[in-house]
Image (cartoon, rainbow, N blue to C red):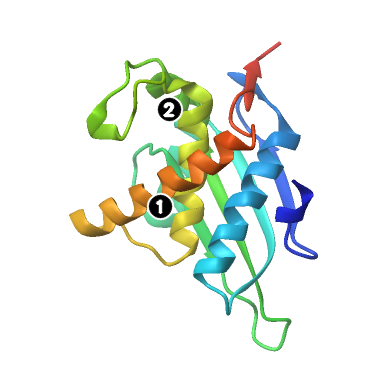
Amino acid sequence: MAGHLTPRMKIAISNWQTLRKPDRQKLRLLAALFMAKVGRCRPGVLWSELTLILADDDGIQDINKQCLGRDESTDVLSLHYTPIPGEKMQHCAELIINVQRAIESGLKPPSPSRGDTVVAWGECRELALYIAHGCDHLTGANDGDHQGSLRMRRRELRWLSLAHEEGLIEGLLLPSG
C-alpha cells in the first residue's frame, strides 16, 4: 500500500473533533490512494503535501466562513495552494472533513439516489466518500452543475470501490475514548 505514496509527498492529519477516534494510518493510506488518482488526472501537477483536518459541524462552518464567506456547515472543503513563485513547483492542499456529518449520514438507510448499493453505507464509507470528493476537486473537477456532479460521483464511487478492495474503509473511525 505504501506504493500509492507520491515520492516526498507528506500526508498530515489534524484531528479537531472528539466524536470518533481516527485510524491515522488507514487515513494516510486512503488519502495516498486517492492522491495517486488525482496525480493521474493532473499529470503536470506535483503534490508535496496534503493535510487532512477532521472537524465537526462548528469547526468546518468556521473555516467555510473564513475561507469562502459561506456561513454554513458542509461535508468537505478542499483548499488548494499553488506554489509560491520562485519556489519548487509543488502544490499543497488541505481537506477539511466533517466527521459529524459522516456519522449522521452513515446512520441513514442506504439510498439509491446517493449511489448506495445493498451494502450498508456506514460512517466510515461516508467519511471515505468525503475524502474522495475533496481529492476529486483537486483534479479540477467541479460539481457546480448536474453533469459535473454526476461525473464526479461516478469517479468517486470507482475510487471507493478500489479502497474497499484494499481494505482501507472499514475501521477508519473508531469509538472515541
Camera-side residue: 23 or 19? 23
To which quarter of the image does residue 112 belong? top left
Q: Quadrant of residue 10?
A: bottom right
Q: Which mark is residue 176?
A: none
The quadrant holding residue 93 is bottom right
| Label 1, label 2: how far apart the Cα atoms are | 21 Å
Residue at 46 percent across and 39 percent down: it is 129
Sort mark 2 into few (<14), some (14-19) or many (20+) by Cα contacts within 10 Å: many
- Residue under circle 2? 101
* Residue 56 visible: no
Label 1: element kind: helix
The vertical placement of 137 against 20, above or below, is below
**Of the residues tagged 1 and 2, which is closer to the observer?**
1
User: How far from the left and from the top, in percent, is residue 157?
Assistant: 41, 43
Q: Position of residue 55 (x, y in %)?
A: 55, 34
> Of residues 10 and 7, which is closer to you in this image?
7
Image coords of residue 166 (percent x, y):
64, 37
Point out the residue furthest to the bottom here.
86
In the rendered image, residue 99, in percent from the top left (x then y), is placed at: 52, 29
From this view, report whether residue 110 is shown above or below residue 73.
above
SS under mark 2? helix
